[in-house]
Image (spheres, rainbow, N blue to C red):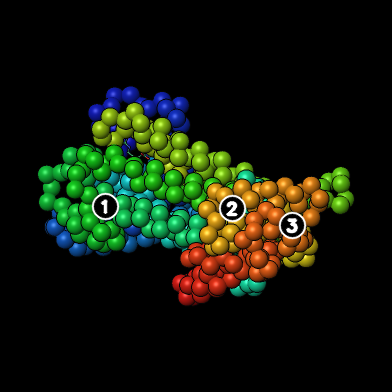
Amino acid sequence: MAAKAWGGRFKQETDPRVEKFTESISFDSRLAAFDIRGSQAHAQMLCDVKLISENERDQIVSTLDDIGGEIDRGEFEWKTELEDIHMHIESQLISRIGDVGRKLHTGRSRNDQVSTDLKLYIREAIEKIDLLLLDVQRAFVAHADEDMGTILPGYTHLQRAMPVQAAHYWLAYCEKYERDRERLADCLKRVNISPLGAAALAGTSLPIDRHLTAKLLGFTEPAANSLDVSSDRDYLAEFVFCLSLIATHLGAWSEEWIIWFTTEFGFIQLPDSYTTGSSIMPQKRNPDVLELIRGKTARVIAAVQQVLVLLKGLPMAYNRDLQEDKIAVFDACDTVIACLELVPDIIEGAELQKENIQARLEEGFLDATALMEYLIKKGVPMRTGHGTVGQLVALCESINCTLSDLSLEELQKASNLIEEDVYQVLGTENAMASLCSYGSGGLEPVKEQLARWKKKLQ
Ligand code: ARG
């Protein structure tokens, strides 16, 4: 019989179709570097507690380095019958250094090993994604700086609502991505607990030192319960959720810019290098990249569902179902990274179409709320002021003019508290300038916001 690492009690060979069905090497080979790092820490620990000698440790560590080098250079041969990355590396180790290699798996199981590998992979992914999000934030802050003083119509329900500084809009996205970064940092706390040495499910009778392997691998501490940690994938569910929210933010932003890029809106110009043409209509410039970012959100969100459904019916502790977790996580992670690698350049290359925006700023009664608040400041109850301004808006619509086009007489017919100074709040620019509350879209609060962001991201 072909020597399977677990083959001792078997009388028949594994059916080749079963080997094909149960393998994970086709997708977990990417864990190789993490698997090797985990094994080297484990060997170091086995030596420290005298389960192997220093010489044996050195042989294991250096042979693992050699194997890692071959994998990196694409010289390593993957075999379906060796199931997964753990078996591939261990069997190579044994074929090279014999009995010494046979000692590596002392006091551990593939169950704690695979989760250790995954956690090391996610830790690196979080680091990478955090830096990419930082690039995105920097791109938004650069625009905020550049566009200071430009006014944008703010929307709710995609209907014109109130005017804001363009910088307020750019910095709004900085806040969203800041929360994404915070969520990843929080997720990292639970990723950073070491499963190694939990072994199959119950720990071991051998004198291993889990605190040492945790420390060697940069984990904060070893997990306190072997049953729990050998089956725990909460951190994966959390991680893909964090990814799905990043993707959701990216998707919603893409949708907005797709709308802004239309002839109807004409709010933004996208760089040529990030748009594509049509095979039949010569004039077309399509926002395909943004559309694909929006579209790819679907598969990242689906990964959350995939992980949760995978976990929902699992009795304690490890079950082979868990092998499928990696498919969802790798895809979600690759997808988000691929999007984030493009986004900063799209933001940097995009330009607000300031003239178009400016030309229509007096449409849509963006100053109506400012007028209502003017009345409140004169002592009018809010609801009454709301009604009064509503009537004035209806009047303007019937005679096709703006609020600031109305004469003082016409305005006073609606409320005798209105005086000449009303023209200091009417008009989009005045309405924007009147915004002064903390966190609002007025000039001064936005200047403060921008200064805070510049300091934070430098
Ligand atoms: N390839 C497996 C996984 O990804 C390794 C875990 C252990 N397998 C086992 N039969 N106990 O989950």
Residues tagged 2 and 3 counted as in contact (Cβ below 8 A) = no
Name the quarter showing ligand 1: top left
Q: Name the residue under label 2.
A: 385
Nearest-to-viewer mark from 2 and 1: 2
Question: Is 28 above or below relative to 313?
Answer: below
Residue 410 - label: 3
Determine crowd level at label 2: few under 14, some 14-19, many 20+ residues with C-alpha closer than 10 A: many
Judge whether 308 appears above or below 121 on screen.
above
In terms of depth relative to the viewer, which is nearer, 79 or 203?
A: 203
Of labels 1 and 3, earlier in sequence is: 1
Residue drawn 44% across and 45% down? 241
Q: In which quarter of the image is residue 12?
A: top left
Q: Quadrant of the N terminus?
A: top left
Q: Which residue type does callout 3 highlight?
A: Glu
Residue 189 image offset from top left, x and y in percent? 31, 55
Q: How crowded is mark 1: few (under 14 residues within 10 Å), some or many (20 or more)?
A: many
Residue 141 can be seen, yes or no: no
> Label 1 amino acid?
Ser
Q: Mark 1 points at which residue?
A: 194
Question: Could you tell me residue 202's position as x and y percent?
Answer: 18, 39
**Left or right: 189 as drawn, with respect to 349:** left
Q: Is residue 151 left or right of residue 138?
A: right
